[in-house]
């Protein structure tokens, strides 16, 4: 075991399986006491069971680490408070929050129900708020904290996942705002884009996966770089853990308000949104002027990622 997180206390939501399990194990391996939070639900949030969280706790303890389970939901404010209280009751403080808990209710927007929209935002986006709001007073009091919110590259646009994409991109804005608010209190906040061969990844429509591949290929080609598909072993969910854990260490104290890719073998820094091109004039634009100038200026390299296809008979 390492000692980078010795005497630190971490809460990891959604850590009963997959990527979250790997993060919890990694933090414990570095000396952190870990609250393993997981409802043990299916991918769509049904059929809760405390088994996965308990199993990870036992795995950590068997390896000589310290951990306790928490079975409360992040989706409601009061139950999220109970997760934080579990850390306080058992370890007297909380230094690290890693929010991974999530569900999928994939559906094309013309078929999506209000419940499917609400449920996904409730766990991912409201869950992030519920956990952060309950944990931050403790971190402010001790003038130290590390918050890592697991977002998703799906927030950049994923067909059939408008609810998930909205929640995940919302988490990015949330993390960036928090970073500015909490920096004076010694608290860092970052969002990460994970990936791996997990239950949730298996539930993503194949059409969306192919879309991701095509987007990655097009981006590489636009930069004059070769597009390389990594081997199956790069999809091991455990590959996310060391990079996410690094953001929780002392060494990462200068990193905040960032979006970090932790999927596969690379660790990637995503650029913040910024203006990449503009056209200007003295006064308001007319549509005739925009018709004339757009395709020769900022619109000339824009490609329609979903060109019109006539209805199939």
Image (cartoon, rainbow, N blue to C red):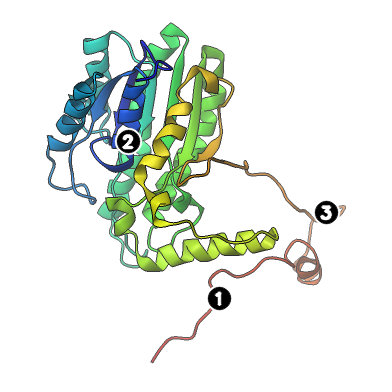
Decide if residue 284 is on the left or right side of residue 7: right
Q: Nearer the viewer, mark 3 or mark 2?
A: 2
Image mark for residue 280: 3
Q: Residues within 10 Å of mark 3 (few under 14, many from 20)?
A: few
**Front tag of 3 and 1:** 1
Q: Residue at x 39, y 35 (%)?
A: 241
Q: Where is residue 11 drawn, in percent x and y?
A: 31, 24
- The quarter holding residue 106 reads bottom left
Asked if residue 68 lies left or right of residue 198, the reply is: left
What residue would you read off at disc 1? 307
Image vertical order of residue 30 relative to residue 287, above or below: above
Q: Which residue, as the protein is rendered here, is positioned at the far right?
A: 282
Give the CA separation, mark 1 to mark 2: 40 Å
Residue at the farthest bottom position? 313
Picture coordinates of residue 291 (x, y %)? Answer: 76, 71
Q: Position of residue 162 (x, y in %)?
A: 40, 57
The residue where tag 2 is placed is 22
Q: Residue at x 51, y 13 (%)?
A: 185
Residues at circles 3 and 2 in contact by the CB criterion of under 8 Å: no
Question: Where, quadrant-wise, is the C terminus in this rendering?
Answer: bottom left
Residue 62 is situated, as x and y percent measured from the top left of the image, at 19, 24
Q: Disc 1 vs disc 2: which is toward the camera?
A: 2
Res. 149 visible in picture: yes
* Residue at (53% x, 30% y) in the render: 177
Q: Toward which corner of the image does residue 253 lie, by quadrant?
A: top right
Residue at 49%, 27% (x, y): give it.
189
Number of other residues with Cα within 10 Å of mark 1, as a class: few under 14, some 14 to 19, many 20 or more: few
Report if the CB atoms under discs 3 and 1 are less than 8 Å apart: no
Foreground of the two, 240 or 270: 240
Identify the mark nearer the N-term, 3 or 1. Answer: 3
């Amino acid at each position: 075991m390492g000692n980078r997180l010795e005497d630190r206390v971490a809460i990891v939501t959604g850590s009963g399986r997959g990527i979250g399990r790997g993060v919890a194990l990694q933090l414990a391996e570095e000396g952190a006491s870990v609250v393993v939070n997981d409802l043990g639900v299916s991918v769509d949030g049904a059929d809760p069971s405390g088994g996965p969280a308990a199993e990870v706790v036992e795995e950590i303890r068997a390896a000589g680490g310290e951990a306790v389970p928490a079975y409360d939901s992040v989706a409601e404010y009061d139950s999220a408070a109970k997760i934080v209280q579990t850390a306080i009751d058992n370890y007297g403080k909380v230094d690290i929050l890693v929010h991974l808990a999530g569900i999928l209710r994939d559906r094309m927007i013309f078929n999506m129900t209000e419940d499917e929209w609400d449920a996904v935002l409730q766990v991912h986006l409201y869950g992030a708020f519920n956990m952060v709001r309950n944990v931050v007073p403790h971190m402010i009091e001790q003038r130290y904290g590390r918050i890592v919110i697991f977002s998703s590259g799906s927030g950049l646009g994923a067909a059939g996942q408008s609810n998930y994409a909205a929640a995940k991109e919302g988490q990015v804005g949330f993390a960036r705002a928090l970073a500015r608010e909490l920096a004076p209190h010694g608290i860092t906040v970052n969002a990460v884009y994970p990936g791996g061969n997990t239950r949730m990844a298996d539930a993503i429509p194949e059409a969306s996966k192919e879309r991701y591949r095509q987007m990655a290929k097009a981006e590489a080609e636009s930069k004059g770089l070769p597009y390389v598909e990594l081997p199956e072993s790069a999809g091991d969910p455990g590959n996310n853990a060391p990079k996410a854990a690094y953001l929780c260490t002392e060494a990462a104290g200068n990193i905040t308000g960032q979006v970090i890719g932790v999927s596969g073998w690379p660790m990637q820094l995503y650029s913040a949104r910024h203006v990449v091109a503009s056209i200007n004039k003295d006064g308001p634009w007319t549509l005739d002027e925009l018709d004339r100038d757009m395709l020769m200026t900022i619109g000339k390299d824009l490609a329609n990622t979903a060109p019109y296809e006539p209805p199939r008979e």
